[in-house]
Image (cartoon, rainbow, N blue to C red):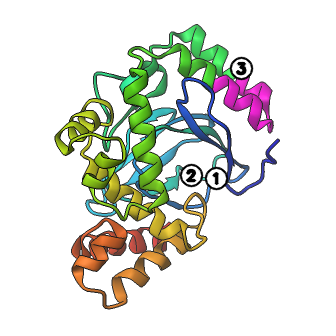
Amino acid sequence: MAALTSARTSVAIPPRSPGLVEALWVARSPHGAPPRVALPDGRPAAVVRLAGHVRWVDPFSREEERIGSVLRGPRSTPQVVLADGDAPVWEIGVRLAPWALSALHPADALVDAHRPLGDALGLDADAWTALERRLRAAGDDAAAAVRALEDVLEAAVRRPVPAHERADLDRVVAVADAERGLVRPLDLARAVDRSLASLHALFAAHLGMTPGAFLSAVRLSCAVRELGVDDRGDAAGVVRVLRSYADAGYAPREVERFTGMSALDLRRSLRGMEELLATA
C-alpha cells in the first residue's frame, strides 16, 4: 500500500497479462502540485485526474496546454508540467509498455501527442463514472487503484499485439534499458535475431517511432535517473543534472551520446526549463 503525501510517489508493480502496465504512480496534494520536468523515456502513459488539472509547457516554444485525464504517447523532448492554480491535485497514472498504444489506440501512436482518456479508450459516460468510482474507493491503496486501471485498459484493447512480436519488443526494450540506451539499433536487432529493416518495421508498427528515437529517449531519462534524481518530483534536480552535461565541456557528439539530445537542443531546452521554473 502506498502512502499518499504532498509529494509524487512511484510504485513499481509486476506486469499482469497482457503486460500493458509497467508502473503505477499516485500524486496527491491539498495545495496544487510542485512544478516538474517530464522526461522522455519511450513510454506512453494513461492518467486519470480525479482533482485538479495541469499545464504542459514546451520549453522550446513556450506553448502550453491545460490537460485533464489523458492517454499520452511517448515524448521526444522534455516538458515542464505546472499545476493549474492552487487547487488540490489527485491523479493516478500508469506508465505503459512501449508497445501498448498499438493495442489500445492503433490508429495513432500519439508521439508527442495525447487524447482525452475516456475518448481514446472508447469509454462511455457510465464506464467512465464507474472507473472514477473505483479509483476514489481505492484511496491510498495503490494495488486496488492499479487493478481498476488495468481492468479498464485490458478491456479497451482493440488490436492485440501478436505474442511473438510482443516478445521481441519486450526483449529489445529490456536490452535498451539495461544498457541505458547506449547501444545501436543494430545491437537491438541482433538481440532478437532480426535484420535492422525488420526491427524498424516492428517499431513502426507498434511504437510509432524508430529504434534510434526510442534509444535517444531512454538515454535522456537514464542520464538523470542513474544519478538518483527523481524526475517525477525534483524539477530542480533534473535541470541541475542536465545543466551539468551541457556545461561540462563534452564534445557535441558525447553530449548527444549520453543525453539523447544534440548539444544545441539541450541548451535551448534547458534555457526554457530554467525560465519556466523560475517564474512558476
Asked whether the residues under the numbered discs 2 and 1 touch, taking CB atoms below 8 Å apart as contact, a structural biologist would say: yes
N-term-proximal mark, 2 vs 1: 1
Label 2 to label 1, Cα distance in Å? 7 Å
Q: Judge depth for marks 2 and 1 and give the one in front.
A: 1
Depth order, front residue of 46/214: 214
Q: Is residue 239 magenta?
A: no
Q: Which residues are magenta?
A: 133-149
Residue at numbered disc 1: 32
Q: CA distance from mark 1 to mark 3?
A: 22 Å
Where disc 1 sits, the SS reads: loop
Q: Residue sitting at 47 percent across and 26 percent down? A: 117
Quarter holding residue 62: bottom left
Q: Position of residue 181 (x, y in %)?
A: 39, 60
Residue 138 is at least partly visible in this image: yes
Residue type of the residue flagged with mark 3: Arg
Contact? badges 1 and 3 (CB < 8 Å): no
> Residue at label 2?
85
